[in-house]
Image (cartoon, grey):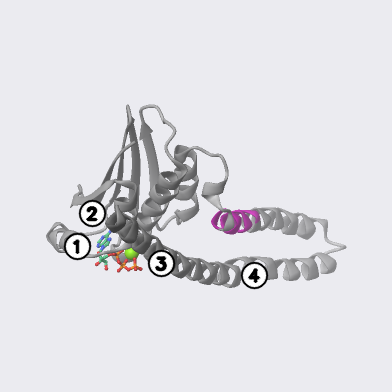
Amino acid sequence: MPIIVTSRKKFDTEISKRAAEICDQIILEMGAELHDDLIQKLSIFRLYIDRLERSVHDPAETETLLINMRTDFEGVIQSVRRISRKLLPEHTNHDSLNTSINLLCKSLERPGLGNIYFETTGNEEAIPPVSRIYLYRIIQELIHNAFKHSSAWHVWVRLKWKAKHLSIEVEDDGSGFNKISEFIERLRKKNNTLKLRSTVIGAIISYHHGEKGLLARIEYDF
Ligand SMILES: Nc1ncnc2c1ncn2[C@@H]1O[C@H](COP(=O)(O)OP(=O)(O)OP(=O)(O)O)[C@@H](O)[C@H]1O
Ligand SMILES: [Mg+2]
């Protein structure tokens, strides 16, 4: 079956290329997060130490400083946790798809700016590792798209397990009704990684009008 082999090869080459681009993007994001968030938060601690030194003879001031330091230190821990989650090779561990998607949702959430709700129904079943990785990447890209292209405040990620069938939905609330048809058309036509990855694992991806935004659905038989 030479045609299938050739097209599979083409898919894999294209996906490797896009994967490398995504890695560059993640490194950039990490750099920005380290610079804008973590370094700022740690710099404050130098000021705290100076102020602590000066407050040696003022126990009330020392106590106030310690309370503030404790709260800010919690923020530092959260920053490091967020960065480490993004750097962890999520799919290489032995977590279930439900668990990795739940962690993915947590790592992409932007408290106060963009909430992600993860819901799952039915009993999870084992699926081939390649499919697990590709479905993970598809969901990741759909969430990225929701925050990048719409003004979504909320994203819902749903995994519905049935016997030998998994249905995945990613829905956002960020686009007006009138615009959705245009976005759906664009996504249907584009030969993007969403389409490539779905084709490789034999899943079907489709786009619909959600309640307040775009609804992407993946149907996968295993
Ligand atoms: N959640 C969404 N809401 C509104 N429009 C969307 C959404 N997702 C995708 N689109 C539209 O569909 C287009 C195609 O999305 P696609 O992910 O293929 O490319 P991209 O995000 O523009 O580029 P890349 O993924 O390569 O960074 C987008 O440019 C955007 O116009
Ligand atoms: Mg995109």
Q: Name the mark on residue 183.
A: 1
Q: Name the mark on residue 214.
A: 2
Q: Amino acid at mark 4?
A: Ile
Q: Amino acid at mark 2?
A: Leu
Q: Residues within 10 Å of mark 2 (few under 14, many from 20)?
A: many
Give the mark nearest the N terminus, 2 or 3. Answer: 3
Check disc 2 and report its element: helix, strand or loop: strand
Mark 1–mark 2 Cα distance, whole angstroms, equals 8 Å
Mark 2–mark 3 Cα distance, whole angstroms, equals 23 Å
Residue 103 screen position, x and y as percent:
50, 46
Q: Quadrant of the C terminus?
A: top left
Q: Amino acid at mark 3?
A: Arg
Check disc 3 and report its element: helix, strand or loop: helix
Task: Tell me the magenta residue range.
Answer: 77-86
Specify whether tag 2 is near ligand 1 (CB below 8 Å).
Answer: yes
1 and 2 marks in contact (CB < 8 Å): yes
Mark 4–mark 1 Cα distance, whole angstroms, equals 38 Å
Q: Is residue 133 left or right of residue 185?
A: right
Mark 4–mark 2 Cα distance, whole angstroms, equals 36 Å
Give the mark nearest the N terminus, 1 or 2. Answer: 1
Give the mark nearest the N terminus, 4 or 1. Answer: 4
Mark 3–mark 4 Cα distance, whole angstroms, equals 30 Å
Q: Amino acid at mark 1?
A: Phe
Q: Name the mark on residue 39.
A: 4
Q: Nearer the viewer, mark 4 or mark 1?
A: 1
Q: Name the mark on residue 18.
A: 3
